Amino acid sequence: MPINPPFPALRMRRMRRDPFSRALMRENTVTASDLIYPVFILDGAGQRQPVASMPGVERVSVDLLLGVAEQCAALGIPALALFPVIDASLKTEDGIEATNPDGLVPRAVRALKERFPELGIITDVALDPFTTHGQDGLIDANGYVLNDETIAMLMRQALTQAEAGVDVVAPSDMMDGRIGAIRGALEGGRFIHTRIMAYSAKYASSFYGPFRDAVCSAGNLGRSDKNNYQMDPANGDEALREVGLDIAEGADMVMVKPGMPYLDIVRRVKDEFKVPTFAYQVSGEYAMLKAAAQNGWLDHDKVMMEAMMAFKRAGADGVLSYFALDIARLLKARA
Ligand code: PBG
C-alpha cells in the first residue's frame, strides 16, 4: 500500500537548500572589527615566551609588541588589550608598581601610540599582576580585599595609564564604586576622552586558570580565590544590577566575562541596557578549543568561527579573544 504523508505546512529547509538563500537570510556576521586582541607583555628586549597552557599565545617584550600591533592594524583589528607580566622583584603587598609612570604598561602604551596612533589601546585596571598575594586589591590582615583603599590605588593606576596616552581603561577588579571613582579621577585630570570599558559582570571563574599562568600570578594567589569580589556563577539578575551601576557611574562600554558559558548574560545585558556590550572569551575557553583541536577532536577553524558567531548572535558588539589574529587572518583569506 503506498504511503502518502501529509506535506508540511512550512518547509524551513527550502531557504537552507542553496548557498544563495542561506547567505540572504543570514542574521549575523563576524568581521575583524568585532575583535579585541589581548596581549601579554614583558620587560626587556627581544623576549618571546610561549604560554604552556595557551598554545599559540606568547608573552612578548615591548619591541616585539610593535610587530603584533602592526599585524592587528594590517588585519583591521581595532584594538589591543595589554596585560603585563611583572617581574617578581617589583611585586609588593600594595602593588604600588601599578602607579609607576615608567612601569611596563605606560612604556608599552607610549611606544604603541607613537607608532600606531590609530590602533585602540586598552589597559587593565586591577592590582593582581603587581601584588605579592595575587589579589586584585589591597588586603587586610585576614587577606580580605579592602574596597575603598583599593579604589584609591585604582584611581592612581588609571590616571597613570591615561597620562601615558591609553585610549581605554578597563577596570577588571570588581570593587564597588570603582567606575564612578575612576571617571571622577579622569575628569579631574582633564582626560575627558579616555573611555572606560567596565568588566561589569565578571564571574569568579575557574576558566581564568591559564591567564593566571600567563601573567605568573597563579603561584602568588596560591589556594585563595576571588569569591568575595567576583560574581557567583549561579547568578544572573545580579549581573544586571552590576551593569546598571557601572553605566550610571560612567562606563562607556560594559563587559561580561567569561564568554561562552555566560552568553545568557550577554543577551540579557544587551536587551536590558542597549549599550556597547562586550564579552571576553577567556584563557580557559581558548585552551579548551585549542587542546581539542590539537588532538584532532575538533576542527580548529570551524569551532573558532562558530564560537565567534555565537557571541555576535548573543548580542555582543565585540569580543576579546586570543583567537583574534587567527580569525582576522581567516576572514582575510576568505575575502
Ligand atoms: C585580572 C584579570 C583576569 C583576567 C583578566 N584580567 C584574571 C583574574 O581575574 O584572576 C582573565 C582573563 C582570561 O582568563 O583570559 N584582574
Image (tube, helix red, strand yellow):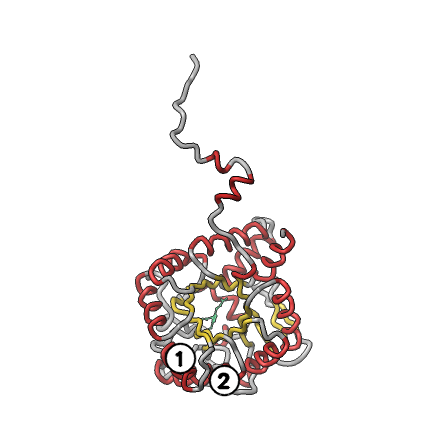
Furthest-right residue in view?
A: 46
Q: Amino acid at mark 1?
A: Arg
Packing grade of label 2 (10 A; few <14, some 14-19, many >=20) is many
Residue 109 is situated, as x and y percent measured from the top left of the image, at 57, 79
Q: Which mark is residue 183?
A: 1
- Give how far apart the Cα atoms at labels 2 and 1 are: 14 Å
Q: Quadrant of residue 186?
A: bottom left
| Mark linked to residue 133 | none
Q: Is mark 1 within 8 Å of ligand 1?
A: no
Query: What kind of element bears circle 1?
Result: helix
- Say which residue label 2 marks: 160
Q: Is residue 121 left or right of residue 236?
A: right
Rendered view: 292 above or below 257: above
Would residue 201 be seen by someone viewing this image from the given angle? Answer: yes
Residue 26, compared with residue 332, is above or below; it is: above
> Does 193 sit above or below residue 289?
below
Image spot of residue 168 (x, y percent): 49, 74
Dot placed on the residue nearer the N-terminal end, 2 or 1: 2
189 lies above or below 207: below
Disc 2 CB within 8 Å of nearest ligand 1 atom: no
Report which quarter residue 289 is drawn in.
Answer: bottom right
Mark 1: few/some/many CA within 10 Å (<14, 14-19, 20+): many
